[in-house]
């Protein structure tokens, strides 16, 4: 993603043509500057995969400074085991990562918040669950002590994911206006053993760096997409 010229007269001709090109063919603007929307804040995380059936890509975090987007850091990323799909058409339990632009309601973790973290950070306890039961009134919500109407088989006992949920950020997919069956528990978290069940994951040191970087007053968002096609990240 990320051709030698013939010898003789062809080389000379090529040099002449290249020499005539104005010096203005500068690098394209940074990714956030090419996007349709960045959420209106001054911090943005982009999670980009090469194509919809990819399970790996790159997460980059950006600051808006004096009207210009500046890269603050980046890391390799993992996506759903079945790739990525447009968020509005996603189905629950499909192991796909939803594309789109989302806010980041709060952070959480089994480990203590990294030193310097200013974002709202919720500690995981033995009684902490994320309800993913479509029949529950707590669908796509954190609960302390699992409610009676939220089946354990349809939920995540957060403390059980020692590696992945050491540090995490809630992604606001299907969070504010919940649609049953669309999906629940989509996070930016620490890498596990491979592709995710629909979340975005990064190495542990990158997750800690993101948590130290993110600021509540900057109204941070995350944009998830591909480099081109119908889920191109520049659409969001």
Image (spheres, grey):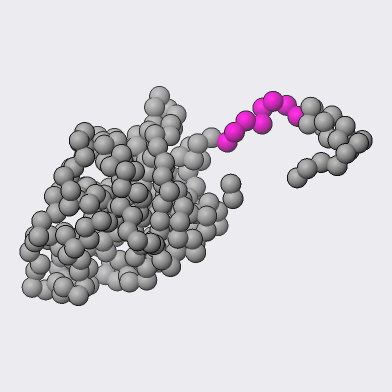
Location of residue 74 (image quadrant): top left
Residue 25 on the magenta segment: yes
Side of 201 relative to 15 (left or right) = left
Q: Is residue 219 above or below residue 106?
A: above
Side of 233 relative to 93 (left or right) = right
Is any part of residue 219 visible from this angle? no
Q: Nearer the viewer, residue 51 or 41?
A: 51
For the point 34% across and 65% down, the residue is: 197
For the point 33% across and 71% down, the residue is: 93
Q: Nearer the viewer, residue 179 or 70?
A: 70
Residue 174 on the magenta segment: no
For the point 39% across and 27% down, the residue is: 65
Q: Nearer the viewer, residue 151 or 39?
A: 151
Side of 126 relative to 227 (left or right) = left
Q: Is residue 43 above or below residue 80?
A: above
Location of residue 153 (image quadrant): bottom left
Side of 19 relative to 86 (left or right) = right
**Number of numbered discs:** 0
In this view, the residue farthest toward the right is 9
Q: At which x and y percent is residue 117?
A: 21, 37
Q: At which x and y percent is residue 224?
A: 41, 52
Q: Which residues are magenta?
A: 21-28
Q: At which x and y percent is residue 144?
A: 8, 60
Location of residue 83 (image quadrant): bottom left
- Magenta: main secondary structure equals loop
Q: At which x and y percent is residue 1?
A: 59, 50
For the point 58% across and 46% down, the residue is: 2
Q: Nearer the viewer, residue 231 or 112?
A: 112
Is any part of residue 68 visible from this angle? yes
């Amino acid at each position: 993603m990320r051709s030698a010229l013939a010898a003789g007269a062809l080389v000379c001709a090529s040099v002449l043509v290249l020499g005539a090109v104005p010096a203005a063919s500068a690098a394209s603007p940074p990714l956030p500057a090419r996007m349709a929307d960045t959420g209106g804040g001054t911090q943005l995380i982009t999670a980009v995969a090469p194509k919809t059936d990819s399970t790996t890509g790159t997460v980059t975090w950006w600051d808006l400074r004096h009207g210009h987007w500046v890269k603050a850091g980046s890391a390799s990323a993992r996506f759903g085991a079945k790739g990525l799909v447009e968020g509005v058409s996603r189905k629950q339990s499909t192991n796909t990562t939803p594309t789109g632009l989302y806010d980041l309601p709060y952070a959480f973790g089994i480990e203590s918040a990294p030193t310097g973290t200013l974002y709202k950070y919720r500690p995981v306890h033995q009684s902490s669950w994320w309800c993913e039961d479509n029949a529950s009134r707590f669908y796509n919500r954190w609960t302390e002590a699992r409610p009676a109407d939220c089946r354990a088989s349809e939920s995540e006992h957060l403390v059980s994911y020692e590696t992945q949920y050491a540090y995490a950020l809630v992604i606001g997919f299907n969070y504010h206006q919940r649609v049953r069956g669309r999906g629940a528990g989509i996070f930016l978290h620490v890498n596990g053993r491979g592709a995710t069940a629909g979340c975005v994951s990064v190495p542990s040191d990158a997750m800690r760096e993101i948590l130290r970087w993110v600021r509540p007053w900057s109204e941070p968002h995350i944009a998830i997409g591909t480099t081109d096609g119908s889920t191109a990240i520049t659409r969001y």
